[in-house]
């Protein structure tokens, strides 16, 4: 018995050693994993910090470098300074969260003069204990992590409000005024009309806007009189262009002034029902030429291109400023540009799209800009939204139609933000509302 116990003791000690080694290996692995987790958190927060700085600075890229009196514009921010500030924000965000990011560890996928995506690599190391007895016996293990954040146009919605219409004749984005949904162009026109009314001492209230067919069915069931409530599928409210306004004290002012802002009284017996009747040009969806001056052009347009843009804008009823911003983003007004993907000319038409629009020579600016105007007119009619039309111009209509959103493509999101930013710099709309998202 004693001999057997003596033989079992070495075996037991060996098993204990194996367990201890396993515990130390697991502890070392846990330390490394913890270090990786800390580095990843640092990279994530560094990328978000950089993107937040980019969001604040983005509108300044589109400010003119020189004021009208020839003095430097203090609001203007060159691209180099924009990137430098983002890199500094990334390094500071990493440092505050126990990570290390050098200037060379921050880059901006997609490039261009107005990048909207930032990638951050955080590098560091963690000291891993080699054994459990000697605290001095440690070695360093390299740990790396990366994160990507981007800016993208934000939906103009409130809490619990859908960003896009559904169940009616309009399926585009929605804007909200006094809690009531409507097309973005209608909202902007209403803002102008309401401001004018306030100046005259009149307060306009929105009682109803876009209504789905299901909502209309409930109203019709409660009051089945087609003169006062249209049957489901027949109400113009399903288009997002109609507003029921009040109170009754405003009816006189509306009758005298609404047409100036693009609204007409739809029915003689409904003093409260006004519809927006502007066309599908970009001014009618709240971007570019909102004051009706479709021929107005930003200062960055070359003199030789200006008449071509004005002609296309008038022919296809699209804002000339919108077309100009696109050309700046597409080719920087280079008639002979060719992209790596094969897009050609000043408007960067792919050969198949050029054929579909009868564009014989994509390198002829006059032909290309006319085809660009026609294509944008068609996309505006289909999507009723400048951001979505721009996304479809860049990525094709199918990805946009599949989600009725700006698809999650880096190039497309950057393109939309860039064109909207250019329009803002041209004074055609406020700078785009952007939100920061951590995407990788």
Image: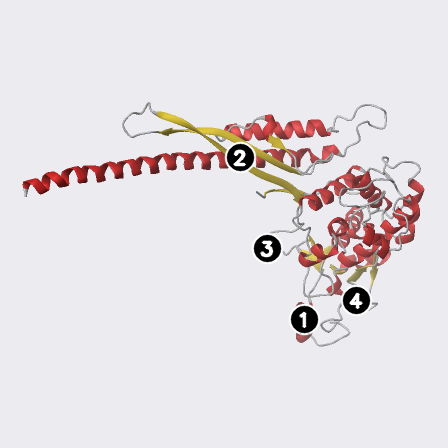
Label 4: few (<14), some or many (≥20) within 10 Å? few
Quarter occupied by residue 116: top right
| Sequence-first tag of 1 and 2 | 2
Label disc, if present, on residue 219 of the rendered structure:
1
Q: Position of residue 58 (x, y in %)?
A: 70, 35
Q: Quadrant of the C terminus?
A: top right
Label disc, if present, on residue 270 of the rendered structure:
4
Label 2: few (<14), some or many (≥20) within 10 Å? many
Left/right of residue 283 with respect to residue 12 in the rendered view:
right
Circle 2 is placed at which residue position?
43
Tell me the element at label 2: helix
Q: CA distance from mark 3 to mark 1?
A: 22 Å
Tell me the element at label 3: loop
Label 1: few (<14), some or many (≥20) within 10 Å? some
Q: CA distance from mark 4 to mark 1?
A: 16 Å
Q: CA distance from mark 1 to mark 2?
A: 53 Å
155 in relation to 171, above or below: above
Label 3: few (<14), some or many (≥20) within 10 Å? few
Q: Position of residue 125 (x, y in %)?
A: 45, 28
281 in relation to 116, above or below: below
The one nearer the camera, 192 or 155, is 155
| Sequence-first tag of 4 and 1 | 1
The one nearer the camera, 276 or 205, is 276
Q: Nearer the viewer, mark 2 or mark 3?
A: 2
Q: Is residue 376 visible?
A: no
């Amino acid at each position: 018995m004693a001999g057997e116990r003596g033989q079992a003791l070495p075996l037991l000690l060996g098993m204990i050693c194996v367990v201890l080694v396993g515990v130390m290996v697991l502890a070392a692995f846990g330390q490394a994993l913890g270090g990786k987790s800390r580095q990843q958190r640092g990279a994530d927060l560094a990328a978000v910090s950089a993107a937040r700085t980019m969001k604040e600075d983005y509108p300044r890229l589109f400010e003119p470098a020189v004021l009208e009196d020839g003095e430097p514009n203090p609001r203007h921010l060159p691209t180099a300074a924009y990137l430098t500030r983002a890199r500094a924000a990334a390094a500071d965000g990493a440092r505050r969260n126990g990570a290390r990011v050098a200037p060379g560890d921050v880059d901006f996928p997609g490039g261009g003069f107005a990048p909207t995506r930032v990638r951050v690599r955080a590098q560091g190391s963690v000291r891993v204990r080699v054994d459990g007895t000697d605290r001095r016996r440690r070695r360093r293990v390299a740990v790396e992590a990366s994160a990507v954040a981007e800016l993208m146009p934000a939906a103009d919605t409130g809490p619990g409000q859908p960003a896009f219409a559904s169940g009616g004749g309009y399926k585009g984005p929605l804007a909200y005024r006094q809690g009531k949904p409507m097309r973005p162009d209608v909202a902007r026109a209403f803002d102008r009309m309401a401001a004018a009314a306030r100046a005259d001492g009149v307060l306009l209230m929105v009682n109803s806007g876009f209504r789905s067919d299901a909502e209309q069915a409930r109203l019709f069931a409660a009051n089945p009189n087609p003169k006062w409530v249209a049957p489901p599928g027949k109400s113009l409210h399903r288009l997002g262009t109609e507003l029921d306004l009040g109170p009754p004290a405003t009816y006189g002012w509306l009758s005298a002034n609404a047409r100036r802002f693009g609204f007409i009284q739809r029915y003689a017996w409904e003093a409260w029902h006004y519809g927006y009747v502007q066309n599908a040009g970009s001014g009618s969806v709240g971007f570019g030429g909102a004051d009706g001056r479709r021929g107005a052009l930003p200062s960055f347009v070359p003199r030789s291109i200006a008449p071509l843009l004005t002609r296309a804008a008038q022919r296809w009823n699209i804002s000339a400023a919108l077309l100009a911003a696109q050309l700046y983003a597409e080719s920087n007004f280079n008639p002979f540009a060719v992209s790596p993907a094969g897009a050609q000319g000043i408007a960067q038409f792919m050969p198949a799209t050029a054929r579909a629009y009868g564009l014989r020579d994509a390198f002829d600016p006059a032909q290309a800009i006319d085809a660009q105007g026609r294509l944008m007119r068609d996309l505006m009619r289909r999507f009723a939204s400048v951001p979505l039309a721009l996304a479809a111009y860049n990525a094709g209509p199918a990805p946009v139609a599949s989600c009725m959103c700006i698809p999650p493509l880096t190039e497309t999101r950057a393109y939309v933000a860039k064109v909207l930013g250019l329009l803002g710099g041209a004074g055609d709309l406020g700078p785009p509302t952007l939100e920061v998202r951590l995407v990788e």
